Amino acid sequence: MPIFEYTCLDCGNTSEILVARQDEIPECRSCRSTNLKKNISAHSSLSGKQLFGPASPCDSGCCNTPTPGCPGPNTCGNM
């Protein structure tokens, strides 16, 4: 059963709605209106083994500019 994101054209609320059947008419969770516009939303395509660990405090995009918690210049990834 796919989950779609809709914006209500009556109240402006945006919500994700589970659509069980193709002929089902979704309704707004706030005002119960069926005057909805289906949004195009991005999906996650991550799967499998994690390749990278969590970002370190030094991951600022520039190893020559230390950030709080970073031991000093040119030390990115060495924590």
Image (cartoon, rainbow, N blue to C red):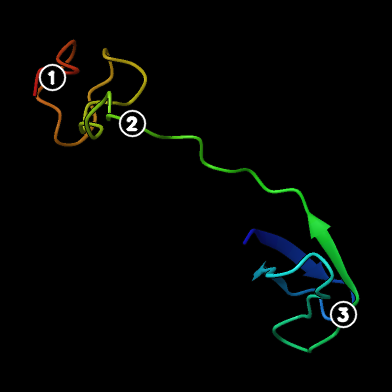
Proximity of marks 1 and 3: CB atoms separated by less than 8 Å: no
Q: Secondary structure at mark 2?
A: loop
Name the image quarter holding residue 31.
Answer: bottom right
Q: Disc 2 to disc 3, how far (Cα)?
A: 38 Å
- The crowding category of the residue bearing disc 3, from other C-alpha atoms within 10 Å (few below 14, some 14 to 19, many at least 20), is some
Q: Disc 2 to disc 1, how far (Cα)?
A: 34 Å
Residue type pointed to by label 1: Gly
Name the image quarter holding residue 50.
Answer: top left
**Marks 2 and 1: which is nearer the front?**
2
Mark 2 / mark 1, whichever is N-terminal? 2
Q: Which residue does the numbered mark 2 point to in the structure image?
A: 48
Q: Which residue does the numbered mark 1 point to in the structure image?
A: 72
Question: In the rendering, which numbered label is found on residue 19?
Answer: none
Residue type pointed to by label 3: Thr
Mark 1 / mark 3, whichever is N-terminal? 3
Q: Observer-nearest residue: 41 or 54?
A: 41
Name the image quarter holding residue 43.
Answer: top right
Q: Where is residue 9 shown, x and y percent of the image? A: 89, 72
Q: Residue at x 8, y 24 (%)?
A: 79
Q: Which residue does the numbered mark 3 point to in the structure image?
A: 34
Q: Observer-nearest residue: 41 or 49?
A: 49
Q: Residue at x 33, y 31 (%)?
A: 48
